[in-house]
Amino acid sequence: MELIKVTEQKEPHVALIELNRPKELNALNPQLMQEVRDALIALDKNEAVRVIIITGNEQAFAAGADIKQMADKSAIDMLLLDQFTTWDQIRKTKKPIIAAVSGFALGGGCEFVMTCDMVIASETAKFGQPEIKIGTIPGAGGTQRLTKAVGKAKAMELILTGRFLSAEEAHFYGLVNKVVPKEMYLHEAFALAKEIAQLSPVAVQLAKEAINRSFETHLDEGLTLERKNFYLTFASADQKEGMKAFIEKRKAEFKGQ
Ligand code: CAA
């Protein structure tokens, strides 16, 4: 891994992926995104990992897809490159992913963040889809996910002007879970990750799948999947332990089985 750094057990059951192209403000080139895909596949298979945090650095989560690598490409070059197939792994990952964002999360960087499951932002974070300013449009889900997150009118404004949202505004519109001082954003992401990592990983993954389905399907189909996953938790030892512990008034010990 050259352009990202992966620590499998930064805290027990919590893995950290750091995007690491600081000179380019973590611009997301195909190599970096392939490394992210490979890391997510490996962490999803690693039974010791229950929650994944993805971060950049204080200055930037990521300032978008790499403009220098795309500038001279033709439409057919872009079609054949098919770079967004690699990005699909972010949404396909079964374990929860928390984005810890400081500084710029623009273009593909904002789309990357919106593909994660939860977002902790430093007060310095800036979100936006400024592609229109360089003569293109979002290509990694921005028109869909930003619209679902902030509503049509605001998404139109942001995507058609390229304006940035401050961390506070992003919080107001429901794009991020929490805004904290700059020195606290990673700490806060770990606090959230550790809280989730204590719970049944089986139930967490089934709940994540059901929530994500609400964005992809009609209510009837979403409710059917939710019900199926709810029943499936009753096949886990974690559900038996969790309910038994509640009745016995003690803390549950979840083993992921
Ligand atoms: N691609 C490639 N390089 C980038 C980059 C990007 N998206 N963003 C920043 N960089 C590079 C800059 O070219 C610069 O490199 P040099 O030192 O070699 O010149 C370095 O990172 C530092 O950037 P700046 O000097 O511009 O820093 P700044 O603090 O003055 O400005 C910024 C920061 C406002 C984020 C500005 O860099 C910027 O506007 N970046 C581009 C943002 C953007 O348009 N993103 C969308 C990309 S297209 C996309 O993402 C399509 C999609 O949907 C997938």
Image (cartoon, rainbow, N blue to C red):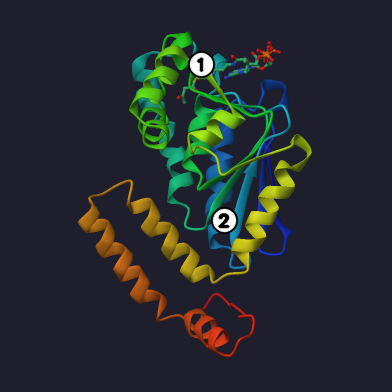
Residue 49: in sight, yes or no? Answer: no
What residue do we see at 46% from left, 16% from top?
Answer: 131
Q: Nearer the viewer, residue 90 or 160?
A: 160
Residue 236's place in the image compared with 173, above or below, is below
What residue do we see at 54% from left, 62% from top?
Answer: 45
Q: Amino acid at mark 2?
A: Ala
- In the figure, is residue 228 to the left or right of 179? left
What residue do we see at 27% from left, 61% from top?
Answer: 223
Residue 16's place in the image compared with 3, above or below, is below
Q: Position of residue 41 (x, y in %)?
A: 52, 53
Q: Nearer the viewer, residue 163 or 204?
A: 163
- In the figure, is residue 10 to the left or right of 85? right
Q: Position of residue 87 (x, y in %)?
A: 46, 38
Query: Residue 147 lies in what quarter of the image?
Result: top left
What residue do we see at 48% from left, 45% from top?
Answer: 90
Callout 2 environment at 10 Å: few (<14), some (14 to 19), or many (20+)? few
Judging by the rendered image, the residue that carries numbered circle 2 is 42
Residue 224: in sight, yes or no? Answer: yes
Q: Amino acid at mark 1?
A: Arg
Does the beta carbon at disc 2 come under 8 Å from ligand 1? no
Residue 179's place in the image compared with 70, above or below, is below
Mark 1 or mark 2: whose residue is earlier in sequence: 2
Ligand 1 is found in the corner quadrant, namely: top right
Query: Residue 57 lies in what quarter of the image?
Result: top right
Asked if marks 1 and 2 touch (Cβ < 8 Å), the reply is no
Judging by the rendered image, the residue that carries numbered circle 1 is 163
Residue furthest right as drawn: 183
Q: Position of residue 125 (x, y in %)?
A: 64, 29
Query: Residue 135 lies in what quarter of the image?
Result: top left
The N terminus: image quadrant: top right
Q: Position of residue 141 (x, y in %)?
A: 40, 32
Per the image, label 1 sits on a secondary structure element best described as loop
